[in-house]
Image (spheres, grey):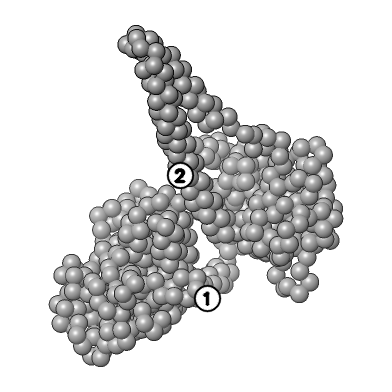
């Protein structure tokens, strides 16, 4: 860092101005006012001493103000450094710089699995930490950065012979405006595993359609040119892969009289119009003969954000010829539906269930025979609300081709699960048909990740602790509406105080605020002392609640379980109190979910305390 002369020059300037004004001003006044030379000499001496005292005081004042400003700046830099280090740890991120060797931060050395010895690492030593398969590419990238100032962006595995799962790191680096090489290292193992799983899934998906003889799948670009053609499409339409690739849909398989309408429907769909519904249609074989198929269509966007159309065609020619083969097809369809993991349902015109497959019992817990004849709204009350009810009516009247949405399913056990519904109009039943998929775990994972991100954003934004805790409780209650959540904080006197309880009555909160954390004093008091989970499934009978049964029951609370959260050293910081409006016990999934939120609360309390210090 270059020395900053602004402070010294300011002090020197003030001193010079003050000295000049004092010397010339005082001499002028003495000359004008004093005629005796002896008195003037004596006053000159006193004036000099007074000058020394005043100038010393002035220099002291200016120096003190500069030192105070420097201390404030140093404190801010220290705080920002701590926040940056915590953020790097949370993001599995470390930093480094290159100056006659690689200098690593503590976070970076932790990611590399190395101990800090105070010495910079050489290029050879750095490469020895990585898997041999990536060393050459890493070496080329690092040399290009050091010698040619080329931006570094390379991923590599750590050399870990004893580890089953590889640790992947992303190295980044560039030359900054001061001519220094700075960079970061980040753990991207989860991303790599996700990418690997995605590639495997895509490969299985491709193999599935390549090896399925009865399902013809074709893919087309925005101009309707073939980009994918499986073996079943060759069997159905007669064109080999090399004959079909690059040719337009309408030229290959659409009869001449229907080409104009097909092209118009696809173009309209691409600009936001209605999708082409699945239907039985006649398409054209290579030899000119017509082929009956059941064709489904899907519009997707590729990695370049370009639209692609996929058609899934099932040959119906033979099915049209004989009733026997139609029955075989219906049997296969029913067998497929019976073994699907998704629940399949059909309703009549009044919305009552007329068909359910076995997956319904697994997802909802209700037996099929007890569910048939009931409206969907019995299990999913949101469908009876005006916006969704209107959409279903539009579907029944033919104004909508299909409808996909997410809502809550009330299971037989009384819990609410997030499900995804797909509706279509059933012409045979004059009602609705569709499927129901359990997406509760995915929804909870997404919401939990959003909660983590929101808490981290609020912490970095230095939001008040009570605001952060209130947000945590609200997000948990959004995930589990049957819960009434409170967060209590433990003070230095071993008393518990309400940190957040947005859904609990004020009178109840006032009654429990400040209770002593002791064994057998409510669920939270016992959990704060024992450091363990405490469950009271019936507050009217549980001995820990003998002093608080009346106020709890008056507030409509009948069950409570409490989970403590701790700091990094294992000291209890506070508790989560989970209340129910009826007697109940938490499931293993509920405990796991709340445990994730206790980690967020613990992080918030610790960082808030650090910020206050």
Q: Position of residue 599 (x, y in %)?
A: 45, 68
Is 419 rendered above or below residue 511? Answer: above
Q: Nearer the viewer, mark 1 or mark 2?
A: 2
From what the image shows, is residue 290 above or below residue 443? above
Q: Is residue 414 left or right of residue 119?
A: left
Q: Residues within 10 Å of mark 2 (few under 14, many from 20)?
A: few
Nearer to the camera, 570 or 387: 570
Residue 539 image offset from top left, x and y in percent: 24, 85
The residue indicated by pointer 1 is: 339
State which quarter of the image contains the N terminus. top right
- Horizontally, is 409 left or right of 124 in the view? left
Report the residue at 35% width, 58% height from top.
Answer: 465
* Coordinates of residue 152 in the picture (x, y in percent): 73, 44
Distance (Cα) linking label 1 and label 2: 68 Å
Give the residue at x 78% y 55%: 121
Residue at image coords 45%, 39%: 64
Whichever of labels 1 and 2 marks the residue nearer the N terminus, that label is 2
Whether residue 564 is visible to the viewer of this picture, yes or no, is: yes
Name the disc covering residue 72, or none.
2
Local secondary structure at mark 1? helix
Report the number of discs.
2
Residue 202 in sight here: no
Residue at image location 72% in from the left, 52% down from the top: 103
Res 586 label = none
Q: Measured from the top left, where is residue 32 in percent x and y?
A: 34, 8
Pick whichever, 341 or 413, lies toward us. 413
């Amino acid at each position: 860092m270059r020395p900053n002369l602004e402070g010294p020059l300011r002090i020197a300037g003030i001193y010079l101005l003050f000295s000049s004004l004092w010397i010339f001003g005082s001499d002028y006044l003495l000359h004008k006012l004093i005629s005796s030379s002896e008195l003037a000499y004596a006053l000159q001496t006193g004036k000099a001493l007074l000058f020394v005292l005043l100038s010393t005081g002035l220099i002291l004042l200016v120096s003190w103000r500069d030192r105070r400003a420097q201390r404030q700046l140093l404190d801010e830099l220290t705080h920002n450094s701590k926040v940056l280090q915590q953020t790097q740890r949370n993001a599995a991120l470390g930093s480094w710089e290159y100056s006659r060797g690689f200098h690593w931060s503590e976070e970076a050395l932790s990611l590399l699995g190395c101990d800090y010895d105070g010495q910079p690492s050489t290029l050879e030593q750095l490469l020895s930490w990585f898997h041999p398969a990536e060393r050459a590419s890493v070496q080329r990238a690092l040399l290009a950065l050091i010698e040619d100032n080329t931006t570094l962006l390379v991923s590599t595995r750590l050399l870990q012979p004893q580890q089953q799962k590889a640790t992947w790191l992303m190295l980044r680096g560039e030359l900054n405006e001061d001519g220094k090489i700075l960079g970061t290292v980040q753990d991207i193992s989860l991303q790599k595993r996700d990418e690997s799983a995605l590639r495997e899934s895509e490969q299985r998906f491709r193999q599935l359609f390549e090896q399925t003889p009865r399902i013809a799948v074709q893919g087309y670009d925005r101009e309707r040119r073939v980009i994918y053609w499986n073996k079943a499409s060759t069997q159905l339409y007669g064109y080999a892969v090399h004959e079909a690739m690059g040719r337009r849909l309408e030229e290959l398989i659409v009869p001449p009289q229907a080409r104009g309408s097909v092209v118009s429907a696809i173009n309209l769909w691409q600009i936001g119009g209605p999708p082409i519904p699945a239907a039985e249609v006649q398409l054209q074989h290579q030899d000119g003969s017509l082929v009956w198929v059941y064709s489904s269509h899907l519009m997707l966007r590729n990695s370049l954000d370009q639209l692609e159309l996929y058609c899934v065609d099932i040959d119906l020619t033979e099915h049209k010829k004989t009733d026997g083969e139609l029955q075989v097809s219906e049997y296969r369809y029913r067998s497929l539906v019976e073994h699907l993991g998704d629940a399949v349902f059909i309703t009549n015109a009044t919305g009552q269930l007329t068909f359910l497959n076995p997956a319904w019992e697994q997802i909802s817990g209700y037996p099929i025979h007890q569910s048939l004849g009931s409206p969907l709204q019995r299990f999913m009350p949101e469908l009876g609300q005006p916006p969704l009810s209107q959409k279903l009516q539009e579907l029944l009247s033919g104004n909508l081709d299909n409808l996909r949405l997410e809502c809550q399913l009330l299971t037989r056990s009384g819990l609410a699960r997030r499900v995804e519904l797909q509706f279509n109009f059933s012409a045979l039943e004059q009602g609705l048909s569709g499927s129901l998929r359990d997406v509760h775990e995915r929804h909870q994972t997404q919401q939990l990740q959003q909660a983590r991100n929101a808490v981290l954003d609020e912490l970095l934004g230095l939001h008040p602790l009570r605001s952060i805790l209130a947000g945590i409780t609200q997000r948990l209650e959004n995930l589990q509406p049957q819960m009434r959540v409170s967060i209590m904080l433990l003070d230095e006197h071993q008393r518990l105080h309400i940190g957040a309880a947005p859904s609990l009555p004020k009178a109840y909160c006032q009654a429990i605020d400040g209770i002593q954390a002791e064994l057998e004093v409510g669920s939270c008091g016992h959990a704060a002392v024992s450091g363990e989970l405490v469950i009271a499934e019936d507050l009217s009978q549980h001995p820990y609640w003998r002093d608080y049964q009346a106020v709890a029951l008056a507030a409509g609370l009948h069950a409570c379980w409490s989970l403590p959260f701790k700091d990094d050293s294992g000291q209890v910081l506070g508790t989560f109190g989970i209340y129910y409006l009826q007697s109940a016990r938490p499931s293993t999934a509920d405990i796991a979910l709340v445990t994730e939120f206790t980690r967020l609360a613990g992080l918030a309390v610790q960082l808030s305390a650090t910020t206050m210090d």
